[in-house]
Amino acid sequence: MSLLTLNKLTKKFGGLTAVDNVSFDADAGSVVGLIGPNGAGKTTVFNLITGNYQPNGGDIIFDGQSVAGLLTHKIVSLGIARTFQTIRLFQNLSVLENVLAGCHCRMKSGIFGGMFCTPAQRREERDALKLALRELEFVGLRQDAEQLSSNLSYGNQRLLEIARALATKPRLLILDEPAGGMNEQETDSLIRLIRRMRERGLTILLIEHDMGLVMEACQKLVVIEYGKKIAEGHPEEIKENPRVIEAYLGTDEDE
Ligand SMILES: Nc1ncnc2c1ncn2[C@@H]1O[C@H](COP(=O)(O)OP(=O)(O)OP(=O)(O)O)[C@@H](O)[C@H]1O
């Protein structure tokens, strides 16, 4: 069953159609990779799903409901979380505080609610702390909870972004180049982490240039070029697709 459906999604920036009538589904519990050359429109698709941009046409259906044009915080509360191509952490907050920021968007009392300290708010804070520590444990950063987030390695900062996104309790997790800046070992453990997130029942949509990760982690690939979908299918099929090889993976003559 499809958790996310893009239906003829279109986004224009002036005269440039960055996303041109793109349609595809992400089945619940699957990992879908969005691939394509630089500037193909991948991040724009993500920004449309997460409400950072408003579409010029088409629709985005999440769990049976249109989310196109909704505000970002509403979209997060419906169960869509993301990480960014360029890491966006609160650099002068601790690792734990960064994850708590993710928890707070689910809390009734809000980020300043704790100031009034009612028993219900204290309980909510305690639950948030437990959840944050659990997600740090899950991504392997529990022992770094008290560190300043800027002290983490680049790869661990990416994991921290994932923990923060998980703390919003999403059903759909959107990862924009999660292996960017990671070494081979870190990428391997990221592949294992993606697998474990899938086992938790999460649906994952990711953009990634690391073909090894894409081939191992995804059940389906959607390929876009110049804003248009040019192919969709199982990674093994996509690897052999001549149109994709020409557009993205490079032909032998290019090597
Ligand atoms: N806010 C914006 N204003 C104007 N043009 C934009 C904006 N965002 C993206 N674009 C343009 O839309 C096109 C698609 O960009 P996008 O960032 O979505 O590509 P991408 O596939 O994610 O690329 P990369 O792999 O390099 O991140 C590009 O030509 C880009 O310059």
Image: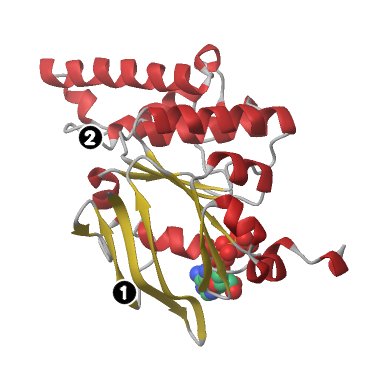
Where is residue 1 drawn, in percent x and y? 27, 49
Closer to viewer: mark 1 or mark 2: 1
Looking at the image, which residue is at 53% across and 19% down? Answer: 141
**Mark 2 highlights which residue?**
110
Is residue 58 left or right of 37 when viewed as pictured?
left
Looking at the image, which residue is at 35% across and 49% down? Answer: 27
Answer whether residue 160 is visible to the viewer in this image. no
- What's the distance in space between the residues labelled 1 and 2, CA to CA? 33 Å
Up-down relation of residue 123 to residue 238 (above or below):
above
Of all residues shown, which one is farthest toward the bottom? 15
- For residue 58, the mark is 1
Colour treatment of the image: secondary structure
Numbered disc 2: secondary structure:
loop
Mark 1 or 2 closer to N-term?
Answer: 1
Looking at the image, which residue is at 31% across and 30% down? Answer: 103
Q: Residues within 10 Å of mark 1 (few under 14, many from 20)?
A: some
